[in-house]
Image (cartoon, coloured by chain):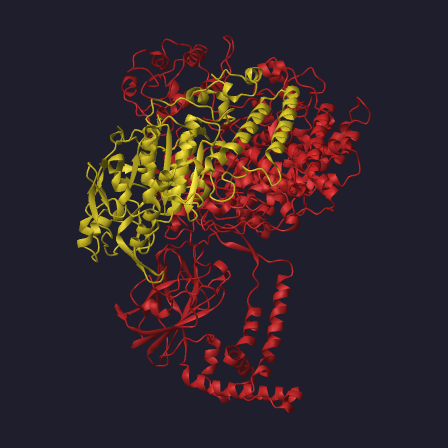
Chain colours: A yellow, B red
């Protein structure tokens, strides 16, 4: 039972939240009152994982719009041979499509593939930088999802459920592990490219308390919403303001005796820290030219590359979970141009991030994930009314993604698809399995990381999923 | 008994962690209460394998049923009342053998030794068993006698007894000024102004130490009668209704739903009784002679999301909306987690998989149209428009252009010119008549014999047109059989297709598109003519209008003939109008045999015809916008036309004549039906097109199994016999006196709103996994009283806030804090952080800018730039102007994928799911919002400006500002602190190390001498401090 009474907390606390007893996952759920008031006194209290983790932090590079695996990762020479022919009906089955007719013709891969690294990983020429770190990554070519439209599939990948309203992966992770640092939010979201189909549901805390919501780091204006003081208010006024707030709150605490007030006081202390640490994080003047060049960053300009560099800086400052959304992969037309363009934006920086983390000794306990919400069809999308040609439609059956660091095996290619790249033939990895594997790397059992609501213990993987141990060292 | 078999190899499907219901420790002589102490243990630890779900059930053992626990005389169960040693259940939970131990060590469940002891004591006490408390009808409990005079209302007596049982004493009544602030916040969601608070204090405490009870009742009455009351309580209801102003999912486009929100505000202000409130929202359209208002109310279940992403299967997302409706109905009225039975029979509560879909069937027979809400006088205005149009038609000939520039004389003599113009028009009309008579074939209306489709319901109307209704798929196929009786002995060489508007269609038609594409548009991908089993060649096609909604590529009727369903004809941009396509045949059709028109519709969204009809002719032709009536007149010889007929034809000519286009378009605009405000509603389907409901295996849209009939779960009272089981019956059943749940669930939710926690803490779950009530008798008393008092929410609120338990001080004393840290036993009032919307509204009051304007489309207050930028399409948030910026938060535009930043930070829901209970949280981002968000900065400036204008000493001004925010009087230490702050700021400004112009900004209107600006800056900064105090955002 949860015997840490609020009274105890009150008598013992200066203000320090850290002094609250660390309630483990089990005792927290055992607290009977938790059923009625699902809020923790200190939501960021570091918490022990279920077992020894291989990763402490995550950087999730989410490629929204769904990159074409057939142009980058999954080499299918037969498609070149059969270009223009329809796929056999036996392959297609009764799959529903977003735009194309199932009898659409095959289109061959637009880029040449070759083997890379000591492991001999097959990658296409469109990702020259990734090819150089083939031995560092774990490529999964057999990911499969339940959803074939963007918003539901993105929400599904990030929350385990296709409709908005459930907590996102980052929220679950911070709920499970707490925060290592109070200087910055534990779960940060950046986005580049266009607006996202899944919207705020992708980093929502769902039914968990809103403190677990991903905090958007914005490319323009304040990095964190409202982190700057308003015009005309300098640091000394801000200090005076916070002092007066503190002393007046403190006085009420003595009179009223409600420990909620000390929680509020502590949250203002954290707010003050954030006001200092966020600008410090954004200041890239301390980065060497080599590092900037490695990522391809112009410090003055928001970009995917800059977000990757910032992600490394966040990891150095013990941020738990970083999401970078890059929107723009939805190649219904001109898949060649689309992939080329998006790889120009993402390839160098993604590879640089892995290398940089490695150089700094952070890759061992930082898990980097790269991938989108589904794959793309081996069949061509052409639609005169929509002005589309030489594109690929959405393909949920099989797609590719890679992970690196955080205990993942490296130089490994896992799973395979049939010669059309249509179905998985070996080692299918469902999105729920990916989620279970990510949690596993963090030392969390996806079946035990639960939240009780409305008669059910909810979890990230719904009622499915299994950690794929073959992917882990 | 086969216990040995089943206790082996348990498959653990779900991870559950256990808990005692209230976390309290029982002493040895406590009597075990099955509902409170035992059932939750069994539910948490046993039911997932030995409960209602027969697919997951192990060893054919059900511990959720009495028979399962105790068995029968012939076959005794695992529990033997009184016999601890004889009970297999006790043996298994205490066993050290991992193969025997229950729950199995391999599972995540675990019974701790105090819990095992509890079960043993229950068995030794004779294992008393009761039905789950929430499924029994509530009865009025006996009221205990209490020793305190001021605790004599039933609510107080029932609360006090529990308090005293736990060794607690009540707190004293809160101070008058605190109470009035509490009542304002609770009942109307605002804070009082210092003047209001002082006035009530004077009435409540006419002299020191005196208490005027009737003044308290008057205060309550005045608040409950205020229109602000409906706005406050509507917000809570909208959490349940998952209200938002956008559709959700990817595109998250705007929707017009605010008439429903206004309906809720009005209904609450009018104290529409909760049973009626329920019936109108669930089934208002089915009430006899349903009013417009009652139909608007059905918007409750139209608050589900609509996915407009290209390429989705609309029927799949409709199914998701239905599952949301079932789950929401369960939560809001029954307090049951019915949604858990979507994929399989409920693991804990007695609700089967099939019953879930039967409940869905009760709600599944509705179409989902937009309901037009004509403004007052709209019809008169339209009639005036028509009159004006008629007048303009008469004037049309006088606009006919003269061939040459008018000579000087003509320009002077208007009358002469006009006469000339009219004459020229008449000549042109004559020529047109000849030409049309020559060109237009004789058109015969083709009445369909049969109209079928893959899914939409096609109804043949009296005028031979076909009207689409019901559901439509991404690709629809229509199959129309025509057999015209006569074509004057000729052969059919042309087919004319009119697409026609209709009020039942999205945007008035003529198409059936309702998402992603333009409402009321269509996309005809392919059209084929068949006769005698052969396809007939169509040589060409023309149309009167065509426009593509997506991309710049052409769309036209000819493209519906090219064999490619991805190209075709649509009429984006001119909805609500008639459009015509004409198809010429290569070889004539035989007119003595039926022929078929086969059409394929849709692109990456559903896009069929909404209303259309065919006519035929014996000659090839081109598409003409003329109506069939006009075409029929054109068949006549000119000489045979009477003047009325000539007038009809003349009008048709003039409206289509190229030289008059400009004038004609004014007339066409006047004739266009007025666009009304609309709102989303449910509309029961016509009897001839019922929608079947199926059980879906694993809850999957793509796995429908057997059809199910509409019904309610068997564990609850049944529907009345002999009536049609429909939504209206469901609605009446929900609020029937026989229903054990609804009244309890409702009073509990309102209790939670006023006391910070429900009597049942899990306000959304009264099932076996929910928390047992802390005060079961109180809950039942309130529920029965609520029903017998006619389901009045206002009277319920009055009952609660006039109780003594409500009026207690919220101060935490040493003893209460130790014995009852979470205040389960109500020995003090709760201190609750205010909800997001109330924080904003209270700050609007404190800043003196709150607008009292009610109702209408949602508005956009200030929020930081870029909040919406991560959403699809990077929409801009353009703040409303004037007082709309300062309206109550219930009127703030709610965009699902990019919620209003401040509300989101403070835990307001975004309308994606039914939310019965908001999690209250604390975060540094909340502090940053109150300190720095542009909206609050603006309010600080407004507050600063108004304080700066007051004549008075700093001491007075500090007190004034303090009271505007916190209501109570400041203490002297607080005054000293604030004065010091004010002095410091003044010095900084005087030293010019602080820019008062930056601080006060450019927006606020105040006389701007240097001195005044400095003063405004000073008070702006103090307001910023006060808005951030814990007390400012807390209900004391």
Of residues B848 and A155, the one drawn nearer to the viewer in this rendering: B848
- Residue A203's place in the image compared with B112, above or below, is below
> Quadrant location of residue A147?
top left
Find residue B18 and report its horizontal and vertical position in percent. Answer: 42, 21
Q: Nearer the viewer, residue B502 or B313?
A: B313
The reply, left or right, for residue B414 in relation to residue A374 is right
Viewer can see residue B174: yes
Q: Residue at x 19, y 42 (%)?
A: A115
The residue at the point 64 percent across, 87 percent down is: B411
Residue A205 seen in render: no
Residue shown at 21%/58% (left/top)? A84
Q: Quadrant of the C terminus of chain B?
A: top right
Q: Nearer the viewer, residue B730 or B455?
A: B455
Q: Position of residue B745 (x, y in %)?
A: 54, 32
Along the horizontal axis of the image, is B611 left or right of A124?
A: right
For this rendering, which residue is in front, B754 or A430? A430
Residue B146 drawn above or below residue A453: above
Q: Is residue A434 above or below residue B321?
A: above
Q: Give the image location of residue B276, x and y in percent.
A: 59, 42
Q: Is residue A326 left or right of residue B882?
A: left
Above or below, comparing residue B1029 to residue A112 in the picture: above
Q: Quadrant of the N terminus of chain B?
A: top left
């Amino acid at each position: 039972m949860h015997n840490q009474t609020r009274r105890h907390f009150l008598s013992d606390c200066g203000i320090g939240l850290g002094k609250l007893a660390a309630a483990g996952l089990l005792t927290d759920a055992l607290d009977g009152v938790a059923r009625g008031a699902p809020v923790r006194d200190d939501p960021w209290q570091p918490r022990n994982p279920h077992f020894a983790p291989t990763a402490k932090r995550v950087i999730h590079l989410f490629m929204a719009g769904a990159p074409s695996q057939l142009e980058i990762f999954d080499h299918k020479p037969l498609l070149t041979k059969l270009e223009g022919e329809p796929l056999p009906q036996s392959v297609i089955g009764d799959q529903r499509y977003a735009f194309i007719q199932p009898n659409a013709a095959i289109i061959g891969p637009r880029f040449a593939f070759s083997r890379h690294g000591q492991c001999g990983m097959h990658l296409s020429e469109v990702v020259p930088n990734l090819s150089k770190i083939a031995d560092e990554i774990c490529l999964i070519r057999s990911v499969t999802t339940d959803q074939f439209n963007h918003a539901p599939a993105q929400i599904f990948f990030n929350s385990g459920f296709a409709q908005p309203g459930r907590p996102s992966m980052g929220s679950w992770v911070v709920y499970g592990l707490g925060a290592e640092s109070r200087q910055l939010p534990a779960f940060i979201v950046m986005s580049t490219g266009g607006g996202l189909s899944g919207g705020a549901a992708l980093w929502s805390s769902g039914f968990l308390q809103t403190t677990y919501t991903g905090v958007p780091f914005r490319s323009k204006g304040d990095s964190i919403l409202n982190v700057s003081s308003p015009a005309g208010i300098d640091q000394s006024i801000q200090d005076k303001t916070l002092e007066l707030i503190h002393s007046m709150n403190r006085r009420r605490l003595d009179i009223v005796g409600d420990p909620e007030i000390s929680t509020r006081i502590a949250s203002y202390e954290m707010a003050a820290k954030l006001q200092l640490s966020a600008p410090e994080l954004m200041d890239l003047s301390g980065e060497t030219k080599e590092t900037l060049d490695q990522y391809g960053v112009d410090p003055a300009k928001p970009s995917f590359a800059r977000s990757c560099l910032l992600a490394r800086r966040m990891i150095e400052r013990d941020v738990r979970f970083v999401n970078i959304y890059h929107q723009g992969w939805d190649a219904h037309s001109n898949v060649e141009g689309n992939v080329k363009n998006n790889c120009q934006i993402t390839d160098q920086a993604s590879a640089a991030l892995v290398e940089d983390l490695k150089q700094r000794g952070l890759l061992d306990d930082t898990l980097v994930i790269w991938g989108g919400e589904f794959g793309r069809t081996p069949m061509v999308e052409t639609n005169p009314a929509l002005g589309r040609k030489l594109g690929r439609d959405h393909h949920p059956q099989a797609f590719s993604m890679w992970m690196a660091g955080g205990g993942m095996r490296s130089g490994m290619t896992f799973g395979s698809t049939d010669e059309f790249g249509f179905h998985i033939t070996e080692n299918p990895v469902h999105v729920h399995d990916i989620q279970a594997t990510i949690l596993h790397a963090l030392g969390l059992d996806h079946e035990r990381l639960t939240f009780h609501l409305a008669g059910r213990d909810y979890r990230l993987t719904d009622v499915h999923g299994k950690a794929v141990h073959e992917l882990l060292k | 008994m086969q216990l040995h078999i089943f206790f082996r190899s348990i498959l653990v499907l779900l991870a559950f962690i256990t808990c005692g219901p209230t976390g309290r420790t029982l002493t040895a002589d406590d009597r075990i209460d099955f509902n409170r102490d035992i059932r939750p243990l069994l539910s948490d630890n046993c039911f997932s394998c030995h409960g209602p779900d027969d697919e997951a059930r192990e060893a054919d053992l059900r511990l959720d049923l009495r028979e399962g626990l105790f068995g029968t005389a012939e076959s005794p169960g695992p529990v033997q009342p009184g016999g601890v040693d004889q009970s297999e259940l006790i043996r298994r939970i205490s066993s050290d053998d991992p193969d025997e131990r229950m729950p199995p060590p391999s599972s995540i469940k675990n019974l701790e030794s105090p819990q095992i002891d509890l079960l043993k004591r229950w068995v030794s006490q004779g294992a008393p068993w009761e039905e789950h408390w929430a499924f029994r009808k509530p009865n009025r409990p006996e009221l205990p006698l209490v020793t305190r005079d001021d605790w004599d209302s039933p609510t107080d007596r029932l609360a006090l007894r529990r308090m005293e049982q736990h060794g607690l004493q009540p707190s004293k009544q809160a101070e008058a000024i605190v109470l009035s602030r509490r009542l304002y916040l609770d009942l109307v969601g605002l804070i009082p102004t210092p003047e209001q608070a002082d006035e009530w204090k004077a009435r409540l405490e006419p002299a020191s130490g005196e208490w005027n009870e009737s003044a308290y009742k008057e205060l309550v009455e005045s608040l409950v009668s205020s229109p602000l009351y409906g706005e406050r309580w509507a917000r809570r209801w909208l959490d349940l209704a998952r209200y938002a102003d956008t559709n959700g999912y990817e595109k998250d486009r705007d929707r017009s739903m605010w008439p429903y929100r206004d309906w809720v505000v009005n209904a609450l202000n009018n104290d529409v009784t909760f049973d009626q409130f329920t019936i109108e929202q669930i089934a208002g359209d089915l009430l006899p002679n349903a009013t417009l208002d009652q139909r608007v109310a059905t918007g409750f279940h139209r608050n589900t999301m609509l996915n407009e992403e290209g390429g989705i299967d609309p029927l799949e997302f409709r199914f998701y909306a239905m599952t949301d409706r079932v789950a929401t109905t369960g939560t809001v009225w029954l307090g049951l987690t019915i949604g858990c039975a979507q994929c399989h029979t409920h693991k804990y509560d007695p609700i089967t998989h099939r019953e879930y879909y039967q409940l869905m069937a009760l709600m599944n027979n509705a179409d989902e149209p937009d309901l037009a809400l004509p403004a007052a006088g709209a019809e008169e205005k339209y009639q005036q428009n028509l009159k004006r149009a008629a007048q303009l038609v008469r004037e049309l000939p006088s606009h006919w252009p003269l061939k040459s520039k008018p000579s000087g004389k003509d320009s002077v003599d208007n009358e002469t010119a006009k006469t000339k113009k009219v004459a020229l028009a008449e000549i042109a009309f004559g020529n047109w008549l000849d030409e049309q008579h020559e060109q237009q074939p004789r058109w015969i209306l083709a009445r369909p014999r049969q109209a079928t489709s893959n899914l939409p319901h096609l109804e043949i109307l009296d005028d031979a047109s076909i009207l689409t209704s019901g559901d439509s798929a991404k690709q629809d196929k229509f199959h129309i059989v025509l057999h015209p009786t006569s074509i004057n002995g000729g052969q059919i060489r042309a087919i004319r297709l009119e697409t026609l508007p209709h009020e039942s269609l999205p945007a008035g038609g003529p198409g059936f598109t309702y998402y992603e594409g333009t409402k009321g548009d269509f996309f005809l991908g392919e059209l084929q003519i068949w006769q005698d089993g052969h396809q007939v060649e169509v040589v060409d096609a023309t149309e009167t209008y065509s426009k593509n909604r997506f991309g710049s590529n052409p769309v036209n009727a000819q493209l519906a003939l090219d064999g490619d369903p991805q190209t075709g004809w649509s009429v984006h941009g001119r909805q609500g109008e008639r459009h015509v396509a004409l198809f010429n045949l290569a070889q004539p059709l035989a007119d003595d045999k039926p022929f078929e028109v086969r059409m394929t519709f849709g692109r990456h969204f559903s896009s069929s015809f909404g209303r259309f009809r065919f006519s035929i002719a014996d000659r090839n032709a081109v598409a003409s916008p003329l109506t069939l009536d006009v075409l029929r007149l054109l068949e006549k010889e000119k000489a045979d036309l009477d003047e009325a007929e000539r007038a009809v034809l003349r009008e048709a000519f003039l409206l289509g004549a190229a030289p008059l286009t400009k004038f004609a378009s004014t007339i066409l605009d006047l004739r266009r039906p007025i666009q009304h405000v609309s709102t989303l509603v449910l509309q029961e389907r016509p009897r001839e097109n019922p929608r079947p409901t199926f059980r879906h295996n694993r809850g999957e849209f793509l796995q429908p199994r057997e059809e199910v009939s509409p019904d309610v779960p068997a564990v609850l009272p049944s529907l009345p016999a002999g009536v049609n089981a429909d939504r209206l019956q469901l609605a009446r059943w929900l609020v029937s006196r026989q229903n054990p749940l609804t009244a309890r669930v409702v009073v509990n939710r309102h209790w939670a709103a006023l006391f910070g926690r429900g009597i049942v803490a899990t306000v959304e779950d009264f099932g076996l996994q929910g928390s047992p009530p802390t005060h079961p008798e109180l809950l039942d008393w309130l529920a029965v009283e609520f029903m017998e008092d006619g389901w009045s929410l206002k009277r319920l609120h009055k009952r609660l806030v006039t109780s003594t338990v409500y009026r207690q001080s919220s101060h935490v004393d040493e003893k209460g804090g130790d014995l009852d840290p979470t205040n389960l036993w109500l020995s003090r009032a709760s201190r609750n952080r205010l909800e997001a919307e109330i924080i904003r509204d209270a700050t609007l009051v404190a800043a003196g800018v709150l607008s009292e304007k009610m109702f209408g489309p949602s508005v956009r207050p200030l929020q930081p730039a870029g909040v919406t930028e991560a959403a699809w399409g990077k929409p801009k948030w353009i703040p409303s102007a004037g007082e709309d910026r300062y309206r109550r938060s219930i009127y703030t535009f709610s965009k699902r994928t990019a919620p209003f930043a401040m509300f989101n930070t403070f835990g307001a829901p975004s309308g994606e799911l039914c939310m019965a209970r908001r999690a209250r949280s604390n975060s540094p981002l909340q502090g940053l919002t109150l300190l720095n968000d542009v909206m609050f900065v603006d309010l600080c400036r407004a507050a600063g400006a108004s304080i700066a204008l007051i004549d008075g000493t700093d001491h007075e001004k500090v007190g004034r500002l303090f009271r505007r925010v916190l209501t109570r009087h400041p203490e002297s230490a607080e005054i000293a602190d604030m004065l010091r702050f004010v002095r410091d700021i003044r010095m900084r400004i005087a030293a010019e190390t602080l820019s008062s112009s930056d601080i006060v900004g450019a927006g606020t209107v105040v006389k701007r001498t240097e001195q005044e600006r400095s003063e405004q800056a000073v008070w702006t900064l103090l307001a910023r401090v006060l808005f951030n105090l814990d007390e400012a955002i807390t209900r004391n």
